[in-house]
Image (cartoon, rainbow, N blue to C red):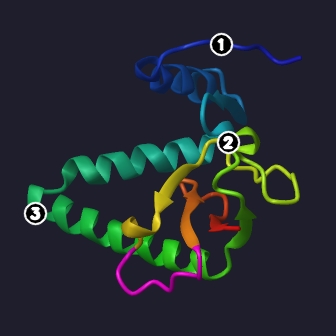
Amino acid sequence: MSEQYQCSDDELGTLLHRLLIVENNEEVVIQHPTEGDVVYTRESYLALLENLQKVNDMSPAQRYQEAKRLERKKQMQFRTAMIEARIEKVDLNDDDNFGKNTDGKDIGMEGMIFVPISNYLKGMNILQAEVGAFVDDTMRRAPIRIVGA
């Protein structure tokens, strides 16, 4: 069994540096409270440091432009993912079966945030009786569209 360490967000960078660079480990698995297991390799850690340095070297105007570019990219990812998203039919009045569809099967929305249709991006197609979608903020998992029964 591998060693386990506990640290705060502030201490994580120092711990990753020690494990990946100083101790020369190939990869480290981080157990994040909301994102689950996240694997960092030495290469991904060095790439992350390089990207942080690029951001640090940017002017405020360049940072603003880059933030806007990333926001547009994330919006496009969301739009594309919503086209192919799984649709779950739920009974909106059944509080006892929250998180389950009308067949009683678990929807799998743990770690996801609910986005009501009023917060959808302009121009998105809304399904009949749709109330919103559960979305992974990191877009690692596909969204789940919720339709009332």
Residues shaded magenta: 121-129
The disc at residue 89 is none
Q: Is 68 within the magenta?
A: no
Please tell me which residue lies in front, 104 or 17: 104
Please tell me which residue lies in front, 112 or 11: 112
- Residue at the extreme front: 93
Q: Where residue 144 sits in the image (x, y, percent)? A: 66, 64
The disc at residue 61 is 3
Please tell me which residue lies in front, 33 or 91: 91
Q: Counting residues from the N terminus, which is met first, the one under dot 2 or under dot 3? A: 3
Kind of residue at disc 1 = Tyr
Kind of residue at disc 2 = Asp
Kind of residue at disc 3 = Ala
Q: Is residue 95 above or below residue 30?
A: below
Residue under pointer 2: 95
Mark 2 and mark 3: span between their CA atoms?
Answer: 48 Å
State the residue at coordinates (60%, 35%): 34
State the residue at coordinates (54%, 66%): 131
Residue under pointer 1: 5
Magenta residues: mostly which secondary structure? loop
Q: Where residue 11 sits in the image (x, y, percent)? A: 45, 17
Question: Foreground mark, 2 or 3?
Answer: 2
State the residue at coordinates (81%, 60%): 102
Please tell me which residue lies in front, 115 or 84: 115
| Quadrant of the rendering where the N terminus is positioned | top right
State the residue at coordinates (45%, 69%): 117
Mark 1 and mark 3: span between their CA atoms?
Answer: 39 Å
Q: Where residue 29 sits in the image (x, y, percent)? A: 71, 32
Q: Is residue 21 above or below residue 110?
A: above
